[in-house]
Amino acid sequence: MMRIFLLIFAFIVVTVVSILGFRGGTTTREPIEVFPDMDRQSRYKAQGESAFFADGRADRLPVEGTVARGQFGLDNHYYRGKEDDGSFAKGFPGIVSREMMERGSQRYAIYCAPCHGAAGNGDGITTEYGMAVVADLHTDRLREMPEGEIFEVITNGRGLMGSYSTQIPVEDRWNIIAYMRALQRAATGTVEDVPADKRSELGL
């Protein structure tokens, strides 16, 4: 029994010394790598050179006519704000709903109000920091502008306003335009615009 105990004890000592005794040691040998997982496969670096292609570039241009996944929009009105003849579309590519207006109000407050102001008067907080020229959304020019052209401005920018195509999805651009139209209508509306059975709610 004592013999077995001594053998086990000796094995433990040798194991511990083997593990701890070589910790921090240096070696010129490469580490054992059971699964290399293609860590050192042949590859080109971004914008690198390649003798395989005639132009000497490793990076290749997309095939002509390639469309990114989810970007194949056939509805010109919805995706580009234009009619099939290329003119700016008037109206919305669908029914304007309460949910659309609520979403538009929320997105407007995030992306538009800092410059154009909460009511669209062009008096957002950016005017206090040197942005002197901000469009007033209540001018005749913008009230008469086709919805498709406003969509174009949000998408690609115009003048001092940059593109918001990467920040605002297509659906939200239409939501914002719907809310913008509501702001414009509210600024010019009269009591006569309110249905007779609803005027009591306004205290009229």
Image (cartoon, rainbow, N blue to C red):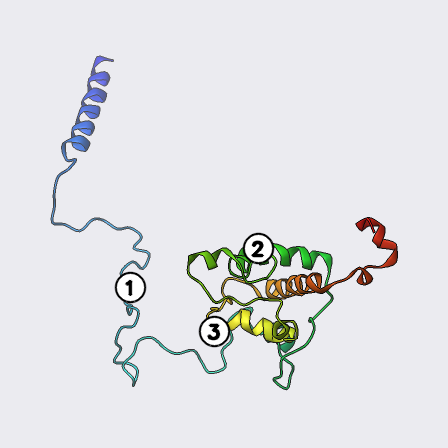
The CA distance from mark 1 to mark 2 is: 50 Å
Mark seen at residue 159: 3
Horizontal relation, residue 66 to residue 5: left or right: right
Q: Residue at x 83, y 51 (%)?
A: 204
Q: The N terminus is located in which quarter?
A: top left
Quadrant hosting residue 19: top left
Q: Secondary structure at mark 3?
A: loop
The tag earlier along the polypeptide, 2 or 3, is 2
Quadrant hosting residue 136: bottom right
Quadrant hosting residue 112: bottom right
**Which residue is tagged 1?**
41
Q: Residue at x 22, y 24 (%)?
A: 12
- 195 vs 23: above or below: below
Q: Are marks 1 and 2 in contact (CB under 8 Å)?
A: no
Q: Secondary structure at mark 2?
A: helix
Of residue 37 and residue 145, the one placed in the foreground of this image is: 145
Of residue 4 and residue 23, the one placed in the foreground of this image is: 23
Of residue 190 and residue 164, the one placed in the foreground of this image is: 190
Identify the residue at the far top of this view.
2
- x, y percent for residue 25: 12, 39
Residue 75 in sight here: no
- x, y percent for residue 129: 42, 57
Q: Secondary structure at mark 1?
A: loop
Residue type, mark 2 in image: Ala
Q: Residue at x 61, y 75 (%)?
A: 141
Residue type, mark 1 in image: Gln
Residue type, mark 3 in image: Gly
How many callouts does the rendering have?
A: 3
Q: Quick one: label 1, few (<14), some, or many (20+) residues within 10 Å?
A: few
**Which residue is tagged 2?**
109
